[in-house]
Amino acid sequence: MIVYSTDEIKMPAFPKRKISQWIKLTAEKYSKRVGDISYIFCSDDKILDINRQYLNHDYYTDIITFDYTENNVISGDMFISIDTVKTNSEKFGTEYINELYRVIIHGVLHLCGIDDKAPGARVVMENSENSALADLKKLLS
């Protein structure tokens, strides 16, 4: 089950049923099934608190993924800072909603086993994101 909630911010507007369908389709491409996935949309302050408390990082980020995947069933809690998504959309010259979709699927790709920290891994992640976003475009049209 995929759930969307907020922590002291307004829920961003997006077609939740279609996005849930897209997440499931993306997981299937990696031979995974969706278990329990929770998206928590929050502020920069909240994500900084989480980053400090659980990861000992002292910086803002767009998403923090807690991975509870077992075997081929992906599960996790994903905290997404709407503030950072907005900042990044301005920084990269992308539409806010497209940046939000990229971050949403970024967490799913992590749950599917795609890394972005190892040398050369960022390119693999970006290609995977772009492929998934192309699938979403078809799904939404």
Image (cartoon, grey):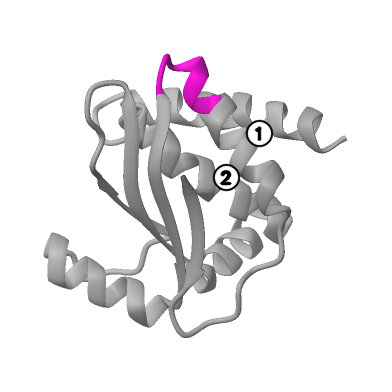
Q: Is residue 18 above or below residue 40?
A: above
| Residue type for callout 2 | Arg
The numbered mark at residue 65 is none
- Res 73 → quadrant: top left
Instruction: Give the residue drawn at x 29%, y 74%.
Output: 48
Residue 7 appears in the rendering: yes
Q: Is residue 73 left or right of residue 98?
A: left
Q: Is residue 25 above or below residue 87?
A: above
Residue 44 at x, y = what percent? 41, 76
Q: Are marks 1 and 2 in contact (CB under 8 Å)?
A: yes
Instruction: Give the residue drawn at x 23%, y 22%.
Output: 71
Closer-to-camera residue (80/122): 80
Magenta residues span 26-32
Was residue 30 drawn as part of the magenta stretch in this picture?
yes
Q: Is residue 96 left or right of residue 125?
A: right
Q: How many numbered callouts?
A: 2
Closer-to-camera residue (139/122): 139
Residue 128 at x, y = what percent? 51, 25
In this figure, which residue is indicated by the disc labeled 2?
102
Mark 1 or 2, nearer chain start: 2
* Mark 1, other Cα within 10 Å: few <14 / some 14–19 / many ≥20: some
Closer-to-camera residue (49/88): 49
Residue 109 at x, y = what percent? 42, 33
| Residue type for callout 1 | Leu
* Secondary structure under the numbered disc 1 in the rendered image: helix
Q: Is residue 18 above or below residue 10?
A: above
Q: How far apart are the alpha carbons under marks 1 and 2? A: 7 Å
The numbered mark at residue 133 is 1
Q: Is residue 8 left or right of residue 87?
A: left
Residue 94 appears in the rendering: no
* Secondary structure under the numbered disc 2 in the rendered image: helix
